[in-house]
Amino acid sequence: MPNANVKSLTETTREKLKDAVSQIEPFLNNNALLQLAGDDAGEETQLFYKGLLSDLRHLLVFSEVSVEKLGVLLRRPNFDIEYAERVLYEAYHQCVSAFYYPKNECYSEDGRYAYTGQDAIRFRFKPSRDSRDIILSVSKIYEELRDELAYYENDYMTQRRMQAQK
């Protein structure tokens, strides 16, 4: 990938992840398990919200770490292309993957809805309005990141292996 493209991709990735962090962090700070599930919630509801909050905390941490790494990279006097590609690879595999493949599987992407204009995110259990809104809001960010960083899913590692064999 040309150097100018890597730098601009690094900048846009950082901005998008900062935007996601700025949405997820207040949600986690303002919502507790009992508040989301309700006092008289059943075990299934409790498990759903425990999983959702856990997955969002992981996503927040991964995104914050990537924002920091990308920021350090952009503040350096000489832009390091190899390090940038590695950080973009990590951002894809940690942040985008954490969003689309959450450990607790409280939601998933149904690709059949992607081209219909409907939300492609399907929840395992009907969430509260706030929970639904935060997931759908950041899904747009992570979908853009997935599209922009798709190169780093396979091609980056293939390129690294080929360089190591030379």
Image (spheres, grey):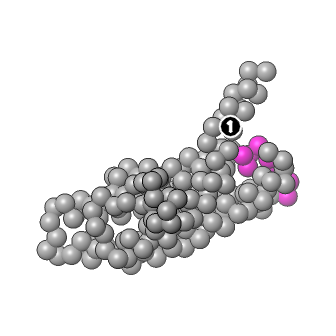
Residue for point 33% across, 57% down: 106
Residue for point 54% across, 65% down: 140
Q: Is residue 6 above or below residue 152?
A: below
Q: Position of residue 118 (x, y in %)?
A: 46, 66
Going by the numbered disc 1, the residue's amino acid type is Asp
- Residue 57 shows in this picture: no
User: Quick check: 54 left or right of 26?
Assistant: left
Q: Position of residue 152 (x, y in %)?
A: 65, 44
Q: Position of residue 87 (x, y in %)?
A: 67, 49
Other-residue count near label 1 (Cα within 10 Å), few / some / many at <14 / 14–19 / ≥20: few
**Quadrant position of the C terminus in the picture:** top right
Quick one: 1 or 23, which is closer to the camera?
Answer: 1
Instruction: Report if residue 151 lies within the magenta region.
Output: no
Task: Indicate the quadrant where residue 14 lies.
Answer: bottom right
Q: Position of residue 155 (x, y in %)?
A: 68, 37
Query: In the rendered image, which residue does mark 1 sit on?
Result: 155
Numbered-mark total: 1
Task: Indicate the quadrant where residue 51 lies.
Answer: bottom left
Residue for point 61% across, 68% down: 18
Residue for point 46% across, 76% down: 26
Could you tell me which secondary element the residue under label 1 belongs to? helix
Task: Indicate the quadrant where residue 132 lies.
Answer: bottom left
Q: Which residues are magenta?
A: 77-85
Q: Is residue 67 above or below residue 165?
A: below
Furthest residue in direction top, as rendered = 165
User: Quick check: 85 left or right of 58?
Assistant: right
**Quadrant position of the N terminus in the picture:** top right
- Residue 30 shows in this picture: yes
